[in-house]
Amino acid sequence: MQPELNSVTDLIGRIYDCSIEPSRWPSVLGEICQHMNGLCAEVQSYDPTTFKARLVYTHGWPDELRALTEKYVSLSPVAPFALVAPLDEPMWSERVFGFEAMERSQYYQLSLGLFGHRDYIHVPLVRNVTEMTGWGVTSHRSQGPFREEHVEFARLLSPHIKRSLRISGLLAEKQVEATGLHGVLDALPCFAVLLNRTGSVIYRNAAALASNALITIERGQIGSRNAHIVALLEDLRNSIHLRGRDVEIQDASGTITQVTWIAVPKTLGDDDLVLVLVRTPAAELHTPLGTAAKLFNLTLAESTVLGALLQGDTLEDASARIGKSRSTIKTHLESIFAKSGVNRQADLIRRVMELKTPFG
């Protein structure tokens, strides 16, 4: 259901009020959430070369979630989409990546999943080699994915948000000039290549020129001996509508490599291109929760419950945070007890916190 014209006009007016009084942004972002059935919203900037985020103005973001997302953003399978998403155009997570794939990612299990986040609409406003700025809204699992009218509403508001930020000086004029995709990719410290549907390399950055154990580039063709990557290449050649892919590959030494595939929007001028990123997350990003999830073979639901308990939640708190009944939370906890070999919550927390990661 579309919001009434008068309420939208009033909201746009308040967006421009933020250019004079930026402290109003959290309240305005709250209004945008109400119109879009969102859980939280933000205006943010981050470094495109490291994906380290800096949340500028927020609504509905608990301090602990802000800390987790800022810590683990380098693991996010969706964050790199901002590298190729057209400026001023809403990027819809459900469409470009899909919740099932996001739910399996380590980033989701260590951060967003603990708070019940479901879908994300992000609008990139400025992109260069030192900073990316945009705004976005997140939905809760109980609300399901966003709908087309929510995307249209974001598209309607975005130019006004950008203009307000520019008036206030948050978007400096030197930042308004967008850097081309090749310029951003060249600044990335990780392996990055652009492929066409036959697997031919259209462009590769400096990091991709170095040798890589997982991916080879010979005579302009990308290849690999790894079964996961071979399967991704087959998807690339056979899928008419390729969505995002994100896989973690662990070698014999325990080192995890994250391979992310992103379909490049045709609005950038090239048809049917895919961006491939190969990243090796830092060892400190692998927490006791992630180690416990792998060691005890926990399901996503069990990992989510354990994550809530590690933050000090009671069963009632975890029930409210995750959006499941107390009896369901208790059932998951009993399963965790069985898998971990303990039968008391205090013993479980102690054992998990004493776990050493396989990386240190």
Image (cartoon, rainbow, N blue to C red):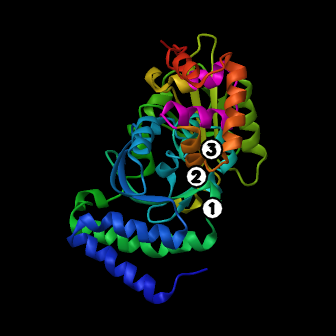
Residue located at (66% from left, 33% from top): 302
Q: What crowding class fits label 1: few (fewer than 14 Cα within 10 Å), some (14-19), or many (20 or more)? A: few
Q: How many marks on residues? A: 3
Label 2 secondary element: loop
Give the percent coordinates (x, y) of residue 204: 51, 37
Residue under label 3, please give it.
Answer: 102
Residue 353, numbered label: none
Residue 264, numbered label: 2
Give the percent coordinates (x, y) of residue 205: 46, 35
Quick check: can you spot residue 122?
no
Q: CA distance from mark 3 to mark 1?
A: 17 Å
Question: Which amino acid, mark 2?
Answer: Val
Q: Are marks 2 and 3 in contact (CB under 8 Å)?
A: no
Residue 143, numbered label: 1
Q: What crowding class fits label 3: few (fewer than 14 Cα within 10 Å), some (14-19), or many (20 or more)? A: many
Q: Earlier in the sequence, mark 1 or mark 2?
A: 1
Q: Quadrant of residue 10?
A: bottom left
Range drawn in magenta: 290-313
Give the percent coordinates (x, y) of residue 97: 63, 50
Q: Earlier in the sequence, mark 3 or mark 1?
A: 3
Q: Quadrant of residue 265?
A: bottom right
Residue located at (56% from left, 70% from top): 150
| Residue 306 falls left or right of residue 175 | right
Question: Which amino acid, mark 1?
Answer: Gln
Q: Earlier in the sequence, mark 2 or mark 3?
A: 3
